[in-house]
Amino acid sequence: MNEQSNSEIEFAKKYYLGFCLALLAGLIWSFGAPTIRYMVDAQIYQWHYLFYRGITVATILIFFLLYKEGIQFHHNFRRVGLSGIIGGVGLAFAFIFFIFGMTFTSAATTLFMIGTQPLFAGLFAYIFLREYVRSATIVACFISLFGMFLMAYNDWYAGTLLGWLFGLLCSIGFSIFAVSLRWRPDTPKFTTIIIAGIVCSIFSVIMIILSGDEYSMPLRNILLSMLHGTFVATGLICLSIGARYLPAAEFMLLSLLEVVGGVLWCWIPIFGINEVPSTITMFGGGAIIFSIAYHAVGTRKRSAA
């Protein structure tokens, strides 16, 4: 009896550790949106920003793997395989479309669109991996589609529909990354993310050359991009550690903290951005948040059963 009690206490400690780490990851990521808003001439330096951010993400994760696995971590690149390459490219383009979404429409629209990622991941897993789709997922998809339609209408009316489209493509990119991990669970996740950072940076350099832009960027933007990359990499490290102790349903709910937090930081006066979302955007975003919460609760109930 005493052994069972100790086991329950140990499980509770691990659960709360995973909960806190996942919560911390979402909180850290939520500061990415206001970071972009502090850029100088954001619509001019997207590719430059992406180059520095991608390099920062890859560098931090390489140092983390060196600390965790030693010099032998480079063997992980041999185990990446097709799933890792597809996932890395999908995540790289998610990085890209996030920046373009943020610079072409409101932070609320882009972040709420990213919130649909678990639903797209479920849809792609059904199409490509033949995974079972629960009724809760189908209901959540329809609710989410309603929210997406509201925001698309609002952005079309405001002349920022392109930003909404970038947010949609960002969500699809993240979904491709998530499904690639489910396709081959033994694929080294951090190595895939390092590939994403490198691909993002290389593609950004190519686009800078093809567009004939200047190679330099204001120091303020360089520092902001490196800070943003640090947020991304640190959140991923927290999430990877917490993932050992927390069910997937809780991860879906906690991921909403990035969305809600990012909208709030750009909205409340304390950060000096004062970006007030429109009423229609808030209604659409609320529908998406409700759909993800409904999906997560349904997943948890099924897991418990």
Image (tube, grey):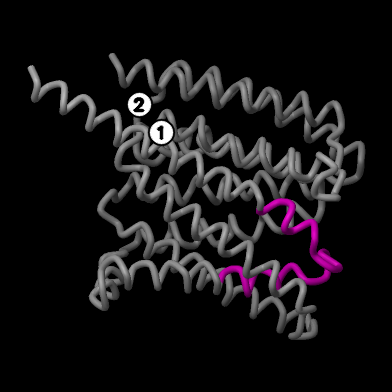
Residue 38 versus residue 300 in the image, above or below: below
Residue in the image at 80% along x and 31% along y: 281
On the image, the x and y values in percent for residue 158 come to 92, 40
Q: In this view, does 100 lie to the left or right of 84?
A: right
Tell which residue pokes out farthest to the right in this image: 158
Give the residue type that dot 1 points to: Tyr
State the residue position of label 1: 126
Q: Does the magenta stretch include residue 47?
A: yes
State the residue position of label 2: 132
267, 121: nearer the viewer? 267
Question: Label 1 neighbourhood size at 10 Å, few (<14), some (14-19), many (20+)?
Answer: some
Residue in the image at 53% along x and 49% along y: 174
Among the 4 quarters of the image, the one containing residue 152:
top right
Residue in the image at 71% along x and 44% along y: 110
Q: Give the mark nearer the N terminus: 1 vs 2.
A: 1
On the image, the x and y values in percent for residue 41 come to 86, 68
Give the residue type that dot 2 points to: Tyr
Q: Residue 4 carries which label?
A: none
Q: Give the range drawn in magenta.
A: 32-54
Q: Mark 2 and mark 1 in contact (Cβ < 8 Å)?
A: yes
Question: Label 2 neighbourhood size at 10 Å, few (<14), some (14-19), many (20+)?
Answer: few
Helix, strand or loop for disc 1: helix
Q: In this view, does 116 lie to the left or right of 44?
A: left
On-image quarter of the N terminus: top left
On the image, the x and y values in percent for residue 143 come to 63, 20
On the image, the x and y values in percent for residue 129 come to 35, 39
85, 42: nearer the viewer? 42
Among the 4 quarters of the image, the one containing residue 14:
top left
